[in-house]
Amino acid sequence: MMQKPLTAREIVMSLKERFRPEKAEPGFETIFHLDISGDNGGQFTVRIADGTLNIEEGLHDTAKCIVTTKDSTYEDMEWGRTNAQMAVMFGKVKVSDLGEILDFIPLFHRCEDFYK
C-alpha cells in the first residue's frame, strides 16, 4: 500500500491503488477528465477499459465526464469531510454527466476507508 495521499494530486494518483475492477461491468469503458484548480491540483485523464485503469497528467481524448473543482474541495470529499452530493448541489463541484459519475464512483475504495 502506498503512503496515505493527502493532496488532491496524490489522491488522484491513488485511484490506481484503490480501483476495484471486479465492480466494473464486463466491457465497461470510460474516460474522465479531472480539472482540479489550486496548488495541489492539476488536470488528469482517468481511463478505464478492459478492467484496467490508467491515469495520465493532462486532458487527453474526449471525456465521457468532466469533473471540475478546487483542490481543497476534492481532498475534503475523498476524505469524507465534505458530502459529495452537497458539494455538487452547491456548485463546489461541477460534473458534466451525473449518470457517468454514478457508475464511476463505486469502482473505487474511498480514501477514508482504504487508508485506515
Image (tube, rainbow, N blue to C red):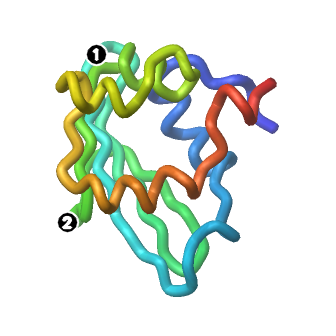
The CA distance from mark 1 to mark 2 is: 23 Å
Which amino acid, mark 2? Thr
Tag 1 and tag 2, C-beta contact below 8 Å: no
Which label's residue is closer to the chain start, 1 or 2? Answer: 1
Outermost residue, bottom side:
27
Residue 89 at x, y = what percent? 23, 29
Quadrant assignment for the C terminus: top right
Give the crowd class for mark 1: few <14, some 14-19, many >=20 residues within 10 Å: few
Which quadrant of the view contains residue 94? top left
Give the crowd class for mark 2: few <14, some 14-19, many >=20 residues within 10 Å: few
Mark 2 secondary-structure assignment:
loop
Q: What residue appears at the point 52 percent right and 14 percent down from the top-left corner? A: 81
Up/down of 79 relative to 101, above or below:
above
Q: Nearer the viewer, residue 43 or 104?
A: 104
Q: What residue appears at the point 67 percent right and 26 percent down from the top-left corner? A: 112
Which quadrant of the view contains residue 24? bottom right
Quadrant assignment for the N terminus: top right
Q: Which label was assigned to residue 57?
A: none
Residue 20 at x, y = what percent? 67, 59
Residue that mark 1 sits on? 38
Mark 1 secondary-structure assignment:
loop
Q: Nearer the viewer, residue 41 or 97?
A: 97
Q: What residue appears at the point 56 percent right and 85 percent down from the top-left corner? A: 26
Number of marks: 2
Up/down of 65 relative to 78, above or below:
below
Up/down of 106 relative to 52, above or below:
above
Q: Which label was assigned to residue 62?
A: 2
Which amino acid, mark 1? Gly
Residue 40 lies left or right of residue 36; in this view the side is right
Q: What residue appears at the point 34 percent right and 63 percent down from the top-left corner? A: 31
Q: Nearer the viewer, residue 72 or 92?
A: 92
Up/down of 21 relative to 102, above or below:
below
